[in-house]
Image (spheres, coloured by chain):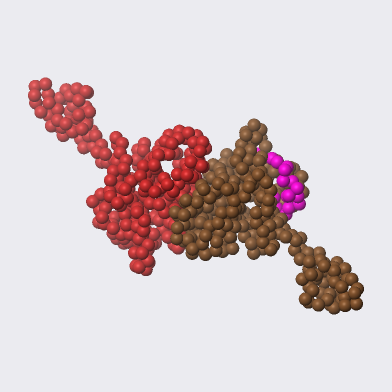
Chain colours: A brown, B red
Amino acid sequence: MEYSLRILGSGSAKPSINRFQTSQVLQMRERQFLIDCGEGTQTRLRQYNSRTARLNHIFISHLHGDHCLGLVGLISTFGMLGRTNDLVIHSHPDLERVIGEQIKFFAADSLFKVIFEPFNPETSEIIFEDKAVTVRTLPLKHTVPTCGFLFEEKQLPRHINKEMADAFNVPIAFYKELKDGIDFITPDGEVVENRRLTTEPTARKRVAYMSDTAYSEKNLQWIEGVDLLYHESTYLSDIDIIKLKTRKHSSAAQAAELAKKAGVKKLILGHYSSTYTSSKPFQDEARTIFLESYAANDGDTFEF
Amino acid sequence: MEYSLRILGSGSAKPSINRFQTSQVLQMRERQFLIDCGEGTQTRLRQYNSRTARLNHIFISHLHGDHCLGLVGLISTFGMLGRTNDLVIHSHPDLERVIGEQIKFFAADSLFKVIFEPFNPETSEIIFEDKAVTVRTLPLKHTVPTCGFLFEEKQLPRHINKEMADAFNVPIAFYKELKDGIDFITPDGEVVENRRLTTEPTARKRVAYMSDTAYSEKNLQWIEGVDLLYHESTYLSDIDIIKLKTRKHSSAAQAAELAKKAGVKKLILGHYSSTYTSSKPFQDEARTIFLESYAANDGDTFEF
């Protein structure tokens, strides 16, 4: 699966019978990102037979236990399995202080380095970039500093129309420029517009992750039209409104409302309170507002 | 169940598909002890619907991740659930340094205290005692300092033979002495031997826990005749002998050999390497040496 989001845990803070705590694997072509790492993440990776050779970056939304207490065990196990690639953890600056000592102790013999890359949770910024993908933080509204993440492919190259390129005798050495949208000038000085020689690039993929958070529209500008929006829905909307506001979580209806306003292609729900036994009512509630809503369970994979 | 051992995790260091890492709940009448606390212990407690109101003491055998990385999550969740009873953790002295910072961070709002009670892993000593039970450390042979534990009820009081006590006009005020085995002297100075007035007390229960360890007989004196011996059996005996010795673990046959020598009533096996998919061969191997061998799986409860 070239593009997929695998749900390792769809539960929230209190342990539940059939859900692990929050963690997900995002696959974007050959890139693999781990988003949050609740207790038991390493067990789920094993149970779901997930390969982790290319998992070099972990993004931690905030420092509540259900989003990061699986890190030490995962890192310790990576050490035992002989991993050699360095591992970068993007998180609130406090994480290194809080778990650094444990990592030193439990992964003392590891052949790889753990690199903490702290981000400022107050502003939206690009915290990861390589030649194909960028990752941007999306500051959320929770009881502690929290960020969601936006994973975006960069603009992909235009496709060359080989027949037309040949007709105009475009040299192969100029193909890179063609793919970048540059016009071709013939030896006679004639300008051939790029759009005659190429076709539109494949649409780039974009995925947004938003957990944990109260309803907030402040990231609308960033998540507009994304292929996949994962949004927490800890409660159904019959929850006491005071409780919802104090705990700074969202209902399924609120997640759907945001998905609708942002015009996303698909909404994935998760992070259900342990008081609910089924995810079905979450999907039902969300679909009354936004049809392309899907309530995730542990082990689900959503392609996009 | 008055006396039982509940297996929360029967796996070992590397995550396995159907096993959690090591953790067990020992019930001795109204006392409840948690032995080791691998990642996911809180999830298993929830899944198995275990009550934890009386769980006030946790015993950690050694500081490998698969025996203690569930502590922070468990303590954090106890905090969320409003626990008020203090929690005592008996372990190697390094534990507080290694996880203390995390506990402060993730259980900051808890209403209970976490008290670290370090023990010296080099010698066998009593590390817990109340009016009914003592817990003794059993130094093991592993790659890091490790102790097993011996949980023993104290000698229970003798049963009063009411008919005989009445026949000799023993005053009720003297019953406590009778139960303790003291002879009764009548007002006339006649000595009535205690064994005429009482019957033997109920046999006290004794449970030994030994994980992780290479084969070792140095604790034989302590575990003789215990009702239940949990002994690790990470491998089957077809394992390369060098590997077994370097890693300082035991085979099922070795666990059974020790159980036989100690004349225990029942042997429970666990802590299987993730390379094995079934526990059945462990039981089969052990039973060729010691018939009362049982290979544990997650969720099993052994009464004694």
Residue at 75%, 63% (x, y): give it: A156
A209 above or below B114?
Answer: below
Is residue B46 left or right of B197 when viewed as pictured? right
Quadrant of the rendered image containing residue A273: top right
Tell which of B190 and A13 is nearer to you: A13
Residue B292 picture location, percent across and down: 31, 54
Residue B297 seen by the camera:
no
Tell which of B258 and A271 is nearer to you: A271
Residue at 22%, 28% (x, y): give it: B176
Residue B262 picture location, percent across and down: 25, 53
Quadrant of the rendered image containing residue A286: top right
Is residue A2 left or right of B53 when viewed as pictured? right
Residue at 43%, 36% (x, y): give it: B113
Tell which of A260 and B71 is nearer to you: B71
Residue at 51%, 36% (x, y): give it: B109
Where does the N terminus of chain B fall, quadrant-wise? Answer: top left
Residue A47 among magenta residues: no
Residue A230 among magenta residues: yes
Where does the C terminus of chain B fall, quadrant-wise? Answer: top left
In the image, the segment drawn in magenta is A215-236
Is residue A94 left or right of B228 when viewed as pictured? right
Residue A299 picture location, percent across and down: 59, 54
A185 above or below B299?
Answer: below
